[in-house]
């Protein structure tokens, strides 16, 4: 497979990934609406008092939150006899899914954590909110929380809150403010980056890095939303959210590697292609193993963590190498960004694997945000440089292609137009080529000076422009020579030559230069419907110009 083929394949995969990312946005919105996140209720308060448990037949009162030792791994049941009539229609929220929590009211199960199709590990369970609506009859009833499977010989019981459904939702929103806030920021930046990419693409400017940034932002925001407890609590398909979350996490490094490939000469590092293939293979193999029932995503999570950390190091090393060779500002920005995201990722991994802290993700999320700020700043600065360079290039090209005296394009533009016509000939019914010559320009320059000669050129150009402004494209291909291309001419050849003759005659009345023009024309299509070669077409128009110059009437012929 050639490099060009690999590059095109990478672009196609990235485009598919981009469309899949935005499709997930729509699905998430529909899932949340179906799950009923918007409940018409109000208020919240901690239910910390009135709790007790039975140990060896003795009642022991506790105040939440609390940490209790597990007696030989036995279950723990907490009782609360004070739900009260005032708490009817209220909702209880707490954590404890890692202990397979069951919430009951007088023996009736209100909430029970059950392992779903998507198996979660301890850290994922500890982030989940356990929500139990109490119903409309709470007077004289006993609320119980049953904890099982202690962790490290103890139960860490978090605070229990009670309130209306809306208050519970707001409480969850406050808990998830960092990831969800980061997700909102990323979604906005994703839309901005995508708009810039489409604008640059429309202007035929290089904007691939903005597409990479948009894809990375979109995938990160989906990962943050689907990984949040709030999303999984109110979703009608929490297993689907977990699956999406894992795949976003496994693949969001792909657009970043594509991004780095587009920097300077980084595309020469073939190891970057290997990195992209490694992340795709990791996602594919893990999916197959889960489908076959051999392993669970949570059991293979360390593979993705190691892969991510390894490639952050590799990308940083390559950037250091490039920066030593060429000390460019954008390389330094990106290097600092990788150092930040690498440090935050390593800290999050230590909290995740060694200490099993459920909020490890906040550190990594803040690191990603800092990474994105530097990344976008780098891309914006590069875009500004590219726009300035392009404007300078266009100005230079305009000077080369545009005649300063007449405003017409020069011979360079004329030849380029002919080349394009060879490719797009079939798009036109016919094309008329007219060569025009200014009579006596050399004599005018010699006898009256170049100042008057320039006036004659300018006056001739205005005559030509007045005739062909709407239907043709005018070029100055020499000192005293012009060419006009009329695509799909609606009038015969003689009509244009007569119009030119008439316009030249009118110029004598308004200026001090007597404009005298000779012209010759040729149609690209032959009478039999076939096309002439470009060489024959130009030769025929030139010959007719030469023949017409010999005629006595010098205003046109």
Image (spheres, helix red, strand yellow):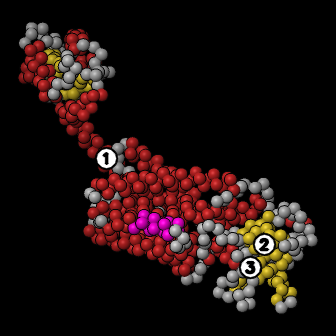
Mark 2 crowd level (few <14, some 14–19, many ≥20, 10 Å Cα): many
Q: Quadrant of the N terminus?
A: bottom left
Q: Looking at the image, which is closer to me, 347 or 524? A: 524
Looking at this view, is 197 or 251 the one in front? 251
Query: Is residue 288 rendered magenta in the image?
Result: yes
Q: Which residue is drawn at 77% across and 60% down?
A: 165
Q: Is residue 139 left or right of residue 459?
A: right
Q: Residue 120's x, y, as percent? A: 61, 72
Which x, y percent locates residue 513? 18, 16
The kind of secondary structure element at disc 1 is helix
> Which image quarter holds the C terminus?
top left
User: x%, y% of residue 131?
Assistant: 74, 67
Magenta-drawn stretch, dominant element (helix, strand or loop): helix
Q: Reading the chain from its start, which is encountered first: label 1 or label 3?
A: 3
Please state the extent of the stretch shown in magenta in the rendering.
Answer: 278-291
- Name above or below for residue 534 compared with residue 373: above
Q: Looking at the image, which is closer to me, 487 or 25?
A: 25
Residue that label 1 marks: 390
Nearer to us: label 2 or label 1? 2
Quadrant assignment, res 265: bottom left
Q: How many marks?
A: 3
* Residue 318 forms part of the magenta stretch: no
List x then y, in percent, for residue 257: 39, 63
- The residue at which mark 3 appears reads as 147
- Circle 1 Cα neighbour tier, 10 Å, few/some/many (<14 / 14–19 / ≥20): few
The answer to which of marks 2 and 3 sits earlier in the sequence is 2
Q: Which of 205 and 457 is in front in this view?
A: 205
Residue mark closest to the camera, 1 vs 3: 3
Q: Which mark is residue 103?
A: 2
């Amino acid at each position: 497979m050639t490099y060009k083929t690999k590059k095109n394949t990478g672009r196609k995969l990235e485009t598919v990934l981009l469309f899949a990312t935005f499709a997930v946005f729509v699905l998430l919105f529909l899932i949340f609406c179906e799950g009923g996140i918007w409940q018409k209720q109000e208020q919240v308060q901690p239910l910390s008092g009135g709790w007790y448990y039975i140990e060896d037949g003795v009642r022991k009162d506790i105040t939440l939150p609390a940490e209790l030792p597990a007696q030989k791994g036995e279950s723990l049941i907490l009782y609360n006899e004070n739900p009260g009539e005032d708490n009817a229609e209220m909702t209880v929220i707490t954590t404890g899914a890692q202990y397979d929590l069951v919430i009951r009211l007088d023996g009736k199960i209100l909430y029970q954590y059950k392992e779903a199709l998507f198996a979660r590990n301890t850290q994922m369970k500890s982030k989940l909110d356990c929500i139990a609506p109490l119903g409309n009859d709470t007077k004289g009833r006993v609320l119980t929380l049953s904890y099982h499977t202690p962790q490290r010989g103890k139960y860490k019981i978090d605070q229990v809150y009670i309130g209306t459904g809306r208050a519970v939702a707001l409480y969850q929103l406050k808990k998830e403010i960092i990831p969800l806030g980061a997700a909102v920021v990323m979604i906005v930046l994703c839309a901005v980056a995508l708009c810039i990419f489409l604008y640059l693409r429309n202007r035929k400017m290089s904007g691939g890095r903005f597409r990479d940034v948009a894809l990375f932002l979109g995938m990160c925001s989906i990962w943050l939303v689907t990984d949040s407890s709030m999303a999984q609590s109110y979703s009608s398909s929490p297993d689907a959210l977990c699956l999406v979350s894992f795949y976003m996490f496994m693949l969001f490094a792909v657009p970043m590697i594509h991004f780095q490939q587009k920097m300077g000469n980084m595309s020469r590092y073939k190891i970057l292609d290997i990195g992209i293939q490694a992340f795709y293979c990791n996602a594919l193999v893990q999916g197959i193993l889960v489908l076959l029932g051999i392993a669970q995503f949570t059991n293979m999570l360390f593979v993705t963590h190691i892969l991510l950390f390894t490639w952050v190091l590799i990308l940083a090393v390559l950037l250091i190498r490039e920066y030593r060779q060429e000390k460019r500002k954008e390389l330094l920005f990106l290097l600092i960004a990788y150092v930040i995201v690498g440090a935050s990722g390593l800290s999050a991994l230590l909290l995740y694997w060694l200490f099993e802290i459920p909020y490890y993700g906040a550190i990594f999320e803040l690191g990603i945000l800092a990474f994105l700020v530097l990344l976008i700043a780098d891309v914006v600065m590069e875009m500004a440089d590219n726009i300035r360079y392009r404007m300078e290039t266009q100005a230079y090209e305009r000077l080369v292609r545009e005649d300063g005296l007449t405003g017409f394009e020069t011979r360079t533009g004329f030849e380029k137009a002919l080349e394009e016509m060879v490719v797009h000939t079939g798009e036109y019914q016919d094309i008329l080529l007219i060569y025009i010559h200014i009579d006596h320009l050399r004599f005018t320059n010699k006898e009256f000076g170049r100042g008057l000669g320039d006036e004659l050129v300018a006056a001739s150009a205005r005559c030509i422009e007045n005739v062909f402004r709407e239907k043709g494209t005018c070029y100055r291909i020499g000192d005293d020579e012009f060419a006009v291309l009329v695509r799909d001419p609606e009038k015969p050849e003689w009509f244009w030559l007569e119009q030119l003759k008439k316009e030249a005659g009118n110029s004598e009345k308004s200026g001090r230069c007597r404009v005298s023009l000779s012209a010759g024309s040729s149609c690209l299509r032959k009478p039999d419907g076939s096309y002439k070669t470009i060489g024959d077409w130009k030769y025929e128009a030139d010959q007719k110009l030469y023949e017409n110059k010999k005629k006595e009437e010098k205003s046109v012929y």
